[in-house]
Amino acid sequence: MPGFEVFGAEEKKEIMDVLDTGVLFRYEFGEQRQGIFKVREFEEKFAAHCGARYGQAVTSGTAALQVAMTALGIGPGDEVITQGFTFVATWEAIFAVGAVPVFTEVDETLNMDPADLEKKITPRTKLIIPVHMLGAQARIKEILAVADRHALPVLEDTAQAPGARLGGKALGSFGVCGTFSFDAVKTITTGEGGMVITNDATLWRRMSEYHDHGHDHVANPGGRGGEGRSFIGFNYRMMEIQGAIGLAQLAKLDDIVARQQQNKAALKEAAAHIPGVTFRTILDEQGDSASFLAFFLPDAEAAAKVNALLTANGAGAMAFGENTWHFYPKWEHLLAGSTLARSGWPFNDAKGKKRVVYDPDLLPKSAALMDRLLVYQVPVKLPEERLRQITEALNKAVNY
Ligand SMILES: *Cc1c(COP(=O)(O)O)cnc(C)c1O
């Protein structure tokens, strides 16, 4: 998964370009910057890599979600549907714009179940956010078909799947926009950072202006220029050093994916020997970013036994049924409605009246899947020795 594994001279060179000018800000500074615009270049190259027209860099993947939703006009009174297996950032951002998150089941793709999505649409639904979790494709075509039937936009949370594709088309480029994260553990990293891609010029202009205090970017598309503002904004600007690192990392993305695919294939072959094992549904193996290998055992007991053996032999897997970061029933603060706001917002309205309550048993189908799921993160660099250790651990788990 992580781009930090391949940090090298390329990142240093890009950073030095910036330090040599002394301009850390993405806009202005005329001659002093000597024509160096790293964030802008990163936006252009990242969007091109995804086959999209525009890229808008921001400070994080969470900010990317927030900026995109704001530019789409999402706010109080709206419901936004996402999946119950994702990182907390997806629904934090929904709350942050004033909307209420509604959660769907996932299926064996470990992503949004399109049939459950259709059931959860109400007259208040204004946006659908499928997440391409663990490096691979959601059923984006089915999801778009449901969305089209209800005339709803789709934003793809692609934080965990840069470089992944479906039928050759980049994930994040199917919906009206796609968001990405470059945080410290993502496939390519700028330490902190994010991006929104889109083909919609109006949406891009709104995101560009909103993320820069609402300053006019019409006179100079994608950059400052004019005076005045059309709407209130905020500050989510990426700095030049992040853009510089992003450029070096982006140049390595295809190679990262190729190496992960190779390593994943080796791990998968070893895991396939475990009786009763099945693998997560991957809609397009060629387009899998291969950041993770996810497999199911027949039941929760078998998964626990297998993982105990793997752990005892130095190759424990992640058990998402127990993971408190990524799965709905483990989000105790969401279920309890814990917030710092005196009114209880966003769980209560301004007068303290309940807006939403989350039932811990809302997603039984997802829970049944998570309980029998084991996951390995796939490294870019997998030394022979480590591969042998994992393979031997998997071989010892066959008699669980
Ligand atoms: C990492 C992540 C985010 C948020 O990204 P940050 O850059 O850490 O804010 C959003 N969604 C998903 C699915 C993620 O994994």
Image: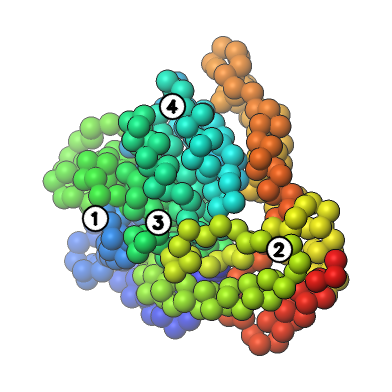
Dot label at residue 277: 2
The residue under label 3 is 171
Amino acid type shown at disc 2: Val
Query: For the residue labelled by badge 4, is the local secondary structure a helix, a strand or a loop?
Result: strand
Q: Quadrant of residue 392?
A: bottom right
Q: Does label 1 or label 2 sit earlier along the sequence?
A: 1
Amino acid type shown at disc 3: Leu
Tell me the distance, in whole angstroms, between the alpha carbons under discs 3 and 2. Answer: 28 Å
Question: Which is in the foreground here, disc 1 or disc 2?
Answer: 2
Looking at the picture, does residue 372 appear above or below residue 275?
above
Q: Residues within 10 Å of mark 3 (few under 14, many from 20)?
A: many
Q: Which sits in the foreground, 94 or 306?
A: 306
Q: Does label 4 or label 3 sit earlier along the sequence?
A: 4
Query: For the residue labelled by badge 2, is the local secondary structure a helix, a strand or a loop?
Result: loop
Looking at the picture, does residue 7 appear above or below residue 43?
below
Residue beneath the point at 69% across and 71% down: 271
Q: Does label 3 or label 2 sit earlier along the sequence?
A: 3
The residue under label 1 is 53
Residue beneath the point at 64% across and 48% down: 326
Tell me the distance, in whole angstroms, between the alpha carbons under discs 3 and 1. Answer: 14 Å
Residue beneath the point at 72% across and 84% down: 388
Q: Does label 1 or label 4 sit earlier along the sequence?
A: 1
Q: Quadrant of residue 227?
A: top left
